[in-house]
Image (cartoon, helix red, strand yellow):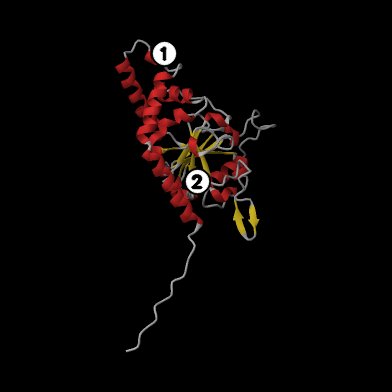
Amino acid sequence: MGTTSPTPWSAVQPSSKVVQHAFVNARVNEINRGTSSLRNETIQAFMNDATLGSRLRGYSSSKKQAFCEDAFDRLTRVLQSRDLTINFKAYKRFTNENPYETYAQMYERGLRNGKMILDDSDPDNPAEIRVGADGRRPSGACTKYGRSYMVLKDKYKTNAIYFPEDTFYASGANLQVSYQVLGALFLKAKHFMHKIIDSCFDNVRLPDSSDGADLMEAHIFEPVRFNGGVETIILTGEPAIDANPPIPLTPPIIANAKTFCRKWGITFIVSGQFEFRGK
């Protein structure tokens, strides 16, 4: 009998998507291995924080410890429940019919060497999906990028990496936390976490802000698809304080956004008025 030659193996480079996915999984796991340490450090920071002192006044040491342990767990749960939102300017995305299927495609500016590129120098054109986790603000997480916003499905939350502010101004592995330990953002934020604590503990709705230091940012390293990835789109015009002159919502903008939302089964709200529910 003749013998068949074995099929030769050939080396195949993994795709950038596979490499990125492996990196994100490894980083999230690395952060989660430090959960106990991050929790204990945050609890200690709560106990030593001057602003929180009024909540602990008159407590015994053991009661302060118990309060701060509960505060960390409560802060984490509330932050986990907050919407992931992407702010945008309605006139930029819906003056014409929007043909795109994913969020990233909306920001692709052009071709280089036959390949679509994402240029990290443009705040409207992120290299990975940068999403604000809002503090129940009326116009999403950060109005700097527009008064309109989309609310993402919860499925994107668990594998995201979170930062205490807009990473166009501050970034680094030392600022990162995972979904599992979101309360530890108290350790990382420069100033705004007391606002978040007021929002979380006292049911305070924060006002709109255009300050990138006033948001909690999530990086999502996977496509955000409009079909099944976006829960709601809230459309609002740009007022004079953000645009000079103001840019209102025109009938074509509203019509194009409505067609887009019906196509992808997205709940649609215009200037606070409910239009229809998605699937």
Question: How dense is the environment of label 1, judged by Cα within 10 Å: few (below 14), some, or many (20 and up)?
Answer: few
Q: Is 11 or 91 nearer to us in this picture?
A: 11
User: Could you say which disc has been placed on residue 261 in the image?
Assistant: 2
| Residue position marked by numbered label 1 in the rendering | 54
Nearer the observer: mark 2 or 1; the answer is: 1
User: In the figure, is residue 244 to the left or right of 102?
Assistant: right
What element does badge 1 sit on? helix
Rendering coords of residue 131 (x, y %): 51, 39
The residue most toward the bottom is 1
| Residue extending furthest toward the top | 58
Q: Residue at x 62, y 33 (%)?
A: 238
Q: Position of residue 198 (x, y in %)?
A: 44, 22
| Residue 123 appears left or right of 199 | right
Q: Earlier in the sequence, mark 2 or mark 1?
A: 1
Residue occupying image coordinates x 61% and y 40%: 123
Q: Type of residue at label 2?
A: Cys
Q: Residues within 10 Å of mark 2 (few under 14, many from 20)?
A: many
